[in-house]
Amino acid sequence: MRGAKQPIYAGAAWVRRQPPKVKAFLCVVTGMAALVFLRFIVHDHDNLFVAAEAVHALGISVLIYKLTKERTCAGLSLKSQDLTALFLAVRLYCSFVMEYDIHTLLDSATLATTLWVIYMIRFKLKSSYMEDKDNFAIYYVVVPCALLAFAVHPSTSHNIFNRICWAFCVYLEAVSVLPQLRLMQNTKIVEPFTAHYVFALGVARFLSCAHWVLQVLDTRGRLLTALGYGLWPSMVLLAEIVQTFILADFCYYYVKSLIGGQLVLRLPSGVV
């Protein structure tokens, strides 16, 4: 086992020595290789979306265990949970008035769980909440997302307010994890359950992004035109890619820590 890990350690050390531009290039190449791999092994790409939902549910389960069994919310960002509840509530509204389907039920369950997490942090486990570390100003993301939604939104026949709301929840979801990443960067040390939860978010968002990208490739771009015209189709795809790459750096250090057998994840400066 020790010998099998040596090439991994050597590869990780080589990556660490590379300049930022090379690391970014390697990240893009790795992502493209993963997409090619998924395209060949997953014939029905809708299964990727189901897998993303399953991984997200697994992450939430870890979060529930942390709050109920460990009786602590240390390391969790209340502001990220607030942003998550906001975009889920807006998306749920859009689902009811625009396209009621199975995703409406999934969003309802996720929103209920998120509201419960918020309640636990605000009231039951408030003494362990790291308020001083959770210092990301959420208006830095809410206001730009609202302005962008007003400027770029779907070109469907729905009411203009509903179309703006739809765009707003797409943009806000892409950046809702930023307060959580800032908190972890402030503490520098991430305990296991929080790390598992954030890594599950990263995997879920990669699978969701892969679902969209592969669908676009398989339909030769027709999916984008089906979403409407103008900048909106491209912005949907860009939002999926952004929310994946936001968590890519953290996922790298998570896997590195896991390979090294470390239970506690230590983040270097500059991850967020």
Image: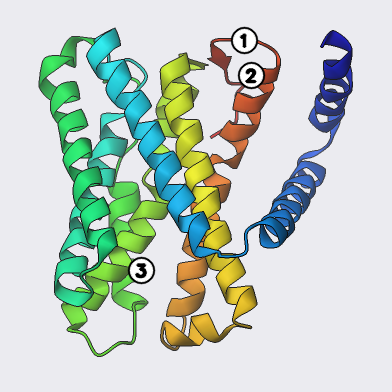
Q: Quadrant of residue 90?
A: bottom left
Q: Quadrant of residue 132?
A: top left
| Tag 1 and tag 2, C-beta contact below 8 Å | yes
| Residue at (40% x, 48% y) in the render | 53
| Tag 2 and tag 3, C-beta contact below 8 Å | no
For the view shown, which residue lies furthest in the left direction?
A: 123
Position of residue 31 measured from the top left corner of the image (x, y, whole percent): 69, 51
Q: Which residue is mark 1?
A: 262
- The disc label shown at residue 258, or none: 2
The alpha-carbon separation of the residues under discs 1 and 3 comes to 41 Å
Counting other residues with Cα less than 10 Å from the Cα at mark 1, is it few (<14), some (14-19), or many (20 or more)? few
Question: For the residue marked with disc 2, what is the amino acid?
Answer: Leu
Counting other residues with Cα less than 10 Å from the Cα at mark 3, is it few (<14), some (14-19), or many (20 or more)? some
| Residue at (83% x, 24% y) in the render | 8
Q: Judging from the image, what secondary structure is the residue with disc 2 in?
A: helix
Position of residue 36 measured from the top left corner of the image (x, y, whole percent): 73, 59
Q: Which residue is mark 3?
A: 148
First in residue order: circle 1 vs circle 3: 3
Camera-nearest label, 2 or 3: 2
Q: Quadrant of residue 91?
A: bottom left
Q: Nearer the viewer, residue 89 or 104?
A: 104
Position of residue 179 measured from the top left corner of the image (x, y, whole percent): 37, 36
Q: Is residue 166 above or below residue 233?
A: above
Question: For the residue marked with disc 1, what is the amino acid?
Answer: Gln
| Residue at (82% x, 11% y) in the render | 1
